[in-house]
Amino acid sequence: MYTEQSSQQATPLEEEPVAPPAIFPDHDVQSTLVLEPSEKWLAWLEVGKAVLLWVTSFLLLVSVPVITALPYVIYQLATFGAKAAQVFATDKNLLFFSVLGILPAHLLTLSVIWMVISEGGRKPFWKTIGFEWPESMPPVITTIACSVLALLLFGLAQLVTYIYGERKTDLDLLIESSLYARLATAFMATVTAPLVEEVIYRGVLYRALEKAAGIAVAVPIVSLLFAGVHVYQYRNNIAVIIVITLLSIVLTVSRALSGKMLPAFIIHLVFNGIQSFFIVLGGFINADSLK
């Protein structure tokens, strides 16, 4: 006889095991599950590939500006000889060419990353790195929220600078060398730097580390890597280092919470855009001394 008790006993045997829910709504469920040994090995292989791309991007950023300025250096040495070498450290044209060289470095970096991640165009590049809108929030609301957060971060940056004081960094000296260097720096900081840096850190590195080791490992490692590569450039100013570290944490956490890369890109874009506005404004205010 089929009784209520027998049906209650049979039900658990008929139920299928349910996978644990994702921590964040936009995450792929697979990323929250335990990977099989073969999948784990492939995930760490992706981490190795991501690290190689990160190293490549760093080498390109260091070498390409030097190569870009090299023809000018050769011309000056051929024209003025040893006297030219004595003034290279303060040569405004040389500094400008060095800044200008960042643009091809960024373009080459994007090209290399696209080639590797998309496997020569066989895979959708932007979707693979998560350059999409979060499904849990409309794009307009996401844009507004990220822009407000960027404004708050910029305000916090001013407070930190006020507390710790402001000292000249290598970037400040570069920007102040000429009006052209100032405008080129503002352009790169707004147009190419947010995209390239987010693709490298929150797109390639974070994606690989999260899949291999989880969010708790990916967030601090990516945050420290992004902040760490800026330390030497801003070594004279503890306030800027603190701000960069806070920005890095916010960008990486936004990537983790949303499951997508676009929110971090918007925050980065708006933050750099505000800075670039004041860089350009300062250039026109002090135009006479920057010619």
Image: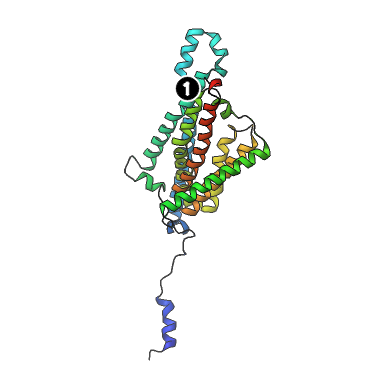
> For the residue marked with disc 1, what is the amino acid?
Phe
Count of numbered circles in the view: 1
Report the front residue among 125 and 12: 125
Residue 26 in picture, x, y percent from top left: 44, 56
Say whether residue 218 is visible.
no
Name the residue beneath numbered marker 1. Answer: 97
Say whether residue 30 is visible.
yes
Report the front residue among 27 and 175: 175
Q: Dividing the picture into quarters, in which one does residue 49 lie?
A: top left
Q: Residue at position x 43%, y 68% from top?
A: 18
Residue 255 in picture, x, y percent from top left: 48, 50
Report the front residue among 281 and 147: 281
Residue 209 in picture, x, y percent from top left: 49, 48
Give the image's coloring scheme.
Answer: rainbow
Q: Residue at position x 44%, y 39% from top?
A: 195
Q: Residue most toward the bottom?
A: 1
Q: Is residue 274 above or below residue 213?
A: above
Quadrant of the image for the N terminus?
bottom left
* Dot 1: element: helix
Residue 168 in picture, x, y percent from top left: 62, 29
Q: Residue at position x 47%, y 20% from top?
A: 69
Q: Is residue 96 above or below residue 275?
A: above
Disc 1: CA contacts within 10 A as few (<14), some (14-19) or many (>=20): many
